[in-house]
Image (cartoon, grey):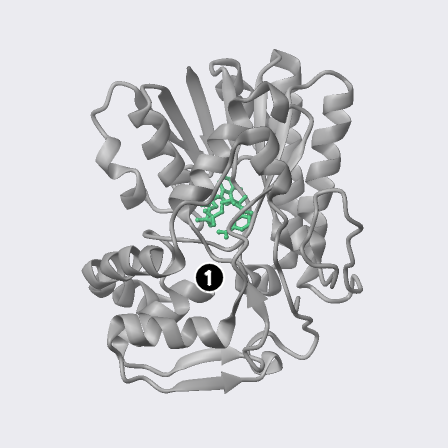
Amino acid sequence: MDILITGGAGYIGSHLADRLLADGHSVVVLDDLSTGRFENIAHHQGNPRFAWVQGDVRDAPLVARLVERCDVVFHLAAVVGVGHVVRDPLRCVQVNVGGTEAVLAAAFAHRRRVLFASSSEVYGKSDRVPFREEDDRILGATRIPRWAYAVSKALDEHLCFAYADRGLEVSVVRYFNSYGPRMDGRGYGSVVARFISQALKGEPLTVYGDGQQTRCFTYVSDTVEGTVRAATRTEALGQAFNIGSDREVAVRDLAEMIRTLTGSSSPIVQVPYEEVFGRQFEEAVRRRPSIDKARRLLGFEPAVPLEEGLKHTIRWFERNLTAETQRAQKG
Ligand SMILES: NC(=O)c1ccc[n+]([C@@H]2O[C@H](COP(=O)([O-])OP(=O)(O)OC[C@H]3O[C@@H](n4cnc5c(N)ncnc54)[C@H](O)[C@@H]3O)[C@@H](O)[C@H]2O)c1
């Protein structure tokens, strides 16, 4: 198949590109390199089945041209990561909603299948764990910038299903804390990336809040597997799926694990949320998916245990730490 990946130079998108190329497909990546990196896809240069375009996913004529030439679109381009969202909620809403509308309109016009990357954030601060796809969502006030991301992704899902009602072939995946090589070591998006870089640099591991908040950390190969299944199975059409591990881990315990696995003697310190994200911040306390639906309809089963995935990720960070540190110093 000919495949378009928006956001394909990013962390998950570049792993998806690796997988689809390895499966024998042709891949075109569209990315503006705002958080993605050319190094993530550079190893495919020279492969006749690979091409990439630097551009904005909100550029509707460009998106329409690229969509027309492909069979399936994996739409991952987005402003991601609490740090980025809180710093620039306007860009988050504009890119996440404007970009998705451009992709869906083009796919609808050319009758192409779409996979949309949504997020566990759409469940907000619901305390009804585990989260099921059809559950109610509980979000905070619109004055709190953090919720801009959740709302933008939920609106994107509405767009997907509205187009599905008109005949578009579309599926939605909601990722739960994906981690692995190529994450941004500055840790704007991922607590795993932040802890690993801090541990390897001998800096204190900064736990935001009391560290009792839980997440389900999913190794990137499992994230990609669920994504490919949702994008290709007929049973997935018109559906949303939780894609992630269902092992719930407190952030404080994650810090301990990473400290042990890196052999670091860094202290673990608690930092109040308001010191990092400003006064108006709200956190989701527990976040665990039910993956029954993905198991039943996609045969999805997370395969990589947390300790093993962390070891792979730590090895990658060890090899790339110098480049990461230089990047971090540049801001
Ligand atoms: N990493 C996770 O745990 C997680 C969790 C839930 C959802 N997601 C979703 O998965 C997708 C990929 O996220 P990621 O973690 O790989 O983050 P990422 O920041 O590495 O990837 C996003 C990519 O989109 C690109 N991009 C941003 N704005 C763009 C624009 N206007 N035009 C073109 N490209 C643009 C970035 O340069 C980047 O390469 C996103 O849609 C995100 O919302 C990720």
Image quarter for residue 241?
top right
Is 194 drawn above or below residue 159 in the view shown? Answer: below
Which amino acid type is marked by label 1?
A: Ser
Q: Quadrant of residue 75?
A: top right
- Position of residue 142 relative to residue 96, above or below, is below
Task: Determine whether, in the image, residue 263 is placed left or right of residue 128.
Answer: left
Q: Is mark 1 within 8 Å of ligand 1?
A: yes
Q: Where's residue 101, x and y in %?
A: 67, 32
Q: Is residue 72 above or below residue 85?
A: above
The C terminus lies in quadrant? bottom left
Q: Residue at x 46, y 39 (%)?
A: 7
Residue denoted by label 1? 190
Q: Relative to the observer, which residue lies in front, 245 or 321?
A: 245
In this rendered view, identify the residue nearer to me: 265 or 163.
265
Q: Position of residue 214 (x, y in %)?
A: 57, 67
Q: Residue placed at 23% from the left, 59% from the top?
A: 315
Does residue 12 appear to the left or right of 292 in the view shown? left
Look at the image and tell me whether residue 58 can be seen. Answer: no
288 shown above or below 291: below
Asked whether residue 147 appears in the rendered view, the answer is yes
**Quarter-of-image position of residue 8:** top left
Q: Residue at x 67, y 73 (%)?
A: 281
At a point 36% along the width and 87% down the height, the residue shown is 267
Mark 1 crowdedness (10 Å alpha carbons): few <14, some 14-19, many ≥20: many
Q: Residue 269: x percent and y percent?
A: 45, 86
